[in-house]
């Protein structure tokens, strides 16, 4: 029996590879910029991709390429809707040394305007675990506290799988969320099997927006100025 040559082995391996489907599409990932197939929600230029939930103009301002949202502007939502998505958000929490707990730098990133990924100054600021930075509010505390000092830029990288619904509009399959906070895993496939607290979406079915929370509507909430930048998403289901 003849010994298989290196060339024959390479041909065999190549042939095997050709049988498992087409090559995946190329997506450029240029460092800190959004991937080439991403939908950019905020690039530092204007607020054209955002509005209040009633459709009126968003009250946040753009200053030096950053989205600045002060107390009183109200929650804002992305005009872009999505189902399953990879989401990137960078945020900067102000130093509020006179406050503590939930009153220190409170905001949130709502997936489908229904599931809140908590934003809070959790650097040396104890609070209840389910309300700390990196928590999915009402579902699970973060696995670890990956918070940076207030005034430093931080990031969320989120993989969101939306709940599935049956023909009657009921949830047939729970959603899930995986989150990296500053590159550290803080939520690992956390199940979303109900509406989240503060949900403003009529039904968990179908696409929804990204929502950024203004905490000023809560009792005794102090004046807070949150900053955001480099917000984008990749639609994982084509919608």
Image (cartoon, rainbow, N blue to C red):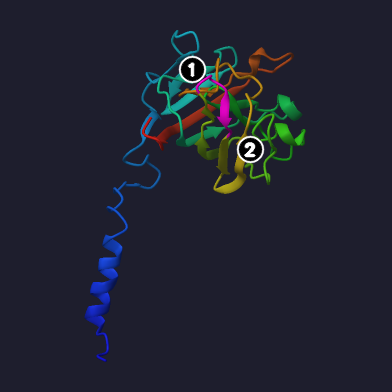
- Of residue 140 and residue 169, the one placed in the foreground of this image is 169
**194 displayed left or right of 7:** right
* Above or below 159: residue 6: below
* Residue 44, position as x, y percentages in the image: 39, 28
Q: Which mark is residue 60?
A: 1
Locate residue 201: give its quadrant: top right
SS type, badge 1 = loop
> In the rendered image, which quarter contains the C terminus?
top left
Locate residue 106: give its quadrant: top right
Query: Which residue is the site of mark 2?
Result: 134
- Of residue 184 and residue 70, the one placed in the foreground of this image is 184
Q: Image point 53% across, 39% down: which residue?
A: 155
Q: Which mark is residue 189?
A: none
Whether residue 43 is visible: no
Q: Earlier in the sequence, mark 1 or mark 2?
A: 1
SS type, badge 2 = loop
* Above or below 80: residue 119: below
Locate residue 12: give its quadrant: bottom left
> In the rendered image, which quarter contains the N terminus?
bottom left
Whether residue 220 is visible: yes
* Above or below 35: residue 108: above
Q: Residues within 10 Å of mark 1 (few under 14, many from 20)?
A: many
Asked if residue 168 is among those painted magenta in the image, a careful observer would answer yes
Main SS, magenta residues: loop
Magenta-drawn segment: 167-174
């Amino acid at each position: 029996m003849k010994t298989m040559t290196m060339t024959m082995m390479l041909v065999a391996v190549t042939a095997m590879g050709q049988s498992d489907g087409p090559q995946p599409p190329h997506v450029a990932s240029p460092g800190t910029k959004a991937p080439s197939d991403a939908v950019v929600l905020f690039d530092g230029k204007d607020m054209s991709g955002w509005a209040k939930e009633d459709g009126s103009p968003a009250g946040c301002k753009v200053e030096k390429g950053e989205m600045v949202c002060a107390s009183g502007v109200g929650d804002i939502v992305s005009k872009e809707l999505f189902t399953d998505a990879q989401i990137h958000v960078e945020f900067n929490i102000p130093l509020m040394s006179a406050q503590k707990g939930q009153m220190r730098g409170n905001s949130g990133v709502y997936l489908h305007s229904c599931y809140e990924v908590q934003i809070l100054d959790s650097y040396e600021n104890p609070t209840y675990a389910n309300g700390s930075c990196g928590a999915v509010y009402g579902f699970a505390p973060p696995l670890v506290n990956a918070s940076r000092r207030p005034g430093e830029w931080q990031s969320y990288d989120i993989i969101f799988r939306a709940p599935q619904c049956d023909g009657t509009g009921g949830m047939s399959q729970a959603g899930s969320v995986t989150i990296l906070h500053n590159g550290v895993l803080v939520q690992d496939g956390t199940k979303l099997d109900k509406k989240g607290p503060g949900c403003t979406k009529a039904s968990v079915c179908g696409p929804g927006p990204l929502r950024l929370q203004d905490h000023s509507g809560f009792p005794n909430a102090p004046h807070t100025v949150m900053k955001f930048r480099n917000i984008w998403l990749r639609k994982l289901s084509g919608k």
